[in-house]
Amino acid sequence: MGFSTRLVASAFQASGPVILGYFPLGFAFGLLFVEHVGLPWSYATAMSLIVFAGASQFLAVGLLAAGVGVFEIAAATFILNVRHAFFGLSVLERWRGAGFKKFFLIYWLTDETYALMTSIKPPPDARETDFHLLMAGINYSAWCLGSTAGALAGEASSFDTTGMDFALTALFAVLLVEQMRQVREVFPFALAFVAGIITIVAFGGENMLLISISLSLGLLIANGARRGWA
């Protein structure tokens, strides 16, 4: 499976904002994991390689540190990551015919990678699935390398990790701006914002993510049906 130098360079350029977010964010996860969970650095690396779910990994650090059971951690992780089902359904048709590459595309799919896939077009004469695969693999590598570096640094010396988890919020904000520049339509973003506010007021911040996504999706579907999916 060979890729042209031009395609690899384009994928790195497109993944730049995510790399700049994933590496320090992974570094923060590695630090937090070693400090709060107390396991060797290799466990943080293994978790990033196998789980690869940024927000869920941060969640797992708190749950593991609190001594929560495996079932509770699995349930919380499922609830937090069920949103990926919506991402996957929207790109499966685009990956038809990708062969074994589809398994990596699915495994490496994240919020940030999805944002790149839906907003950046591949170079001329390049297969879209190859471009997506490279971007996803680059982002995956950046996260795993950052996690390993952070865990090693955490074992070598002590760090004040206060506020490090804000890196995830900052990365989402940058990707939101990029999506708005590409889509150039205010309605979906305004609807998501209103849905988030309603969810916080009605259900509280702890249950915001899944409920607000479901509410936004329902309203977008209703609006699309009303407009005849024009």
Image (cartoon, grey):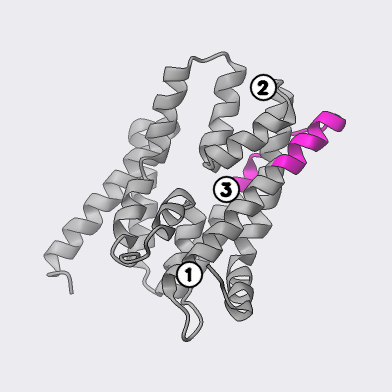
74 or 127, which lies in front? Answer: 127
Q: Where is residue 16, by image quadrant?
A: bottom right
Residue type at tag 3: Thr
Q: Does the magenta run of residues contain 207?
A: no
Q: Percent position (x, y) of residue 157?
A: 87, 31
How far separated are the C-alphas under marks 1 and 3? Answer: 29 Å
Residue at the image position 29 percent from the left and 45 percent from the top = 214
How far separated are the C-alphas under marks 2 and 3? Answer: 23 Å
Q: Which residue lies most toward the bottom here?
A: 124
Residue type at tag 2: Val
Q: Magenta region: which residues?
A: 148-168
85 or 137, which lies in front? Answer: 137
Dot in front, 1 or 2: 1
Q: Please name the residue that numbered disc 3 is placed on.
A: 169
Q: Percent position (x, y) of residue 97?
A: 32, 66
Dot in front, 1 or 3: 1
Q: Percent position (x, y) of residue 212?
A: 34, 44
Residue at the image position 66 percent from the left and 33 percent from the top = 44
Whether tag 1 and tag 3 are in contact, CB under 8 A, the answer is no
Label located before the other in sequence (2 or 3): 2
181 or 94, which lies in front? Answer: 94
Label located before the other in sequence (1 or 2): 2
Using a 10 Å C-alpha cutoff, classify the residue at mark 3 as few (fewer than 14 neighbours), some (14 to 19) or many (20 or more): few
Residue type at tag 1: Asp
Query: Which circle marks residue 37 in the picture?
Result: 2
